[in-house]
Amino acid sequence: MANYNKVILAGNITRDPQLKYLPSQTAVCEFGLAINHRWRSQDGEQREDTCFIDCSVFGKQAETFNQYMSKGRSVLVEGRLRLDRWEDKDGQKRSKHHVSVQSFQFLGQGGQGGQGRAAPQQGQSNQQPPSQAPHDDLGGGYDNPPQQQTEPAPPPGDDIPF
């Protein structure tokens, strides 16, 4: 049987990202994500549930994420689900699910995140203005962060048939 492990989440950062470096000098940025779910109960009452997920992003993306993101900002992350296991100080076995982020997209203008634009990463493009960026309908405008895309934008002047 084939296996598939992919997670896509959009939510708000619950705490300022923490940037650390592994002994191999690989950057790791850890942050929490809150995803809200709203629904109406059978009696018509508006309800809300919040899911809190720990996430980590590695390498150059970790440094970029740490530079531009802060508590309260909105982000869309794509990655894989992992199960972390450990023993606490009392000897009890503990575990929790964790998202290992492979790509992300800055959303909205929540929080007080950094200003400015970084150079695009290898294989990525900054040719699109922020108002025309993908997923703009998920969170509104941008605060000038770099676009995190897995595919470069088409060259200017190419017609895209819709």
Image (cartoon, rainbow, N blue to C red):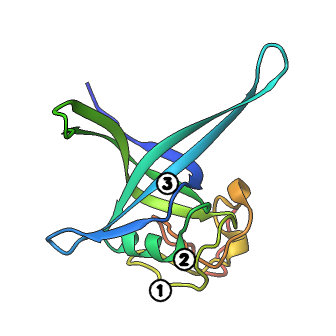
Residue holding disc 3: 77
Q: Amino acid at mark 2?
A: Pro
**Disc ID at residue 159:** none
- Please tell me which residue is depicted at 49% across the width and 65% down the height of the picture: 16
C-beta proximity under 8 Å, tags 2 and 1: yes
Is 5 displayed left or right of 25 in the figure?
A: right
- Please tell me which residue is depicted at 39% across the width and 66% down the height of the picture: 18
- How would you rate the neighbour count of disc 2 (Cα within 10 Å): few for under 14, some for 14-19, many for 20 or more? many
- How would you rate the neighbour count of disc 3 (Cα within 10 Å): few for under 14, some for 14-19, many for 20 or more? many
- How would you rate the neighbour count of disc 1 (Cα within 10 Å): few for under 14, some for 14-19, many for 20 or more? few
Q: Amino acid at mark 3?
A: Val
Q: Nearer the viewer, residue 112 or 101?
A: 112
- Please tell me which residue is depicted at 53% across the width and 46% down the height of the picture: 9
Is 8 displayed left or right of 130 in the figure?
A: left
Which element carries disc 3, helix, strand or loop? Answer: strand
Q: Amino acid at mark 1?
A: Ala
Up-down relation of residue 55 to residue 21 (above or below): above
Cα distance between the residues tagged 1 and 3 = 20 Å
Q: Quadrant of residue 88?
A: top left
Which element carries disc 2, helix, strand or loop? Answer: loop
Which element carries disc 1, helix, strand or loop? Answer: loop
Residue holding disc 1: 119
Res 162 seen here: no
Q: Position of residue 74 (x, y in %)?
A: 61, 59
* Lower position in the chain sequence, tag 1 or tag 3: 3
**Disc ID at residue 146:** 2
Cα distance between the residues tagged 2 and 3 = 15 Å
Cα distance between the residues tagged 2 and 1 = 7 Å
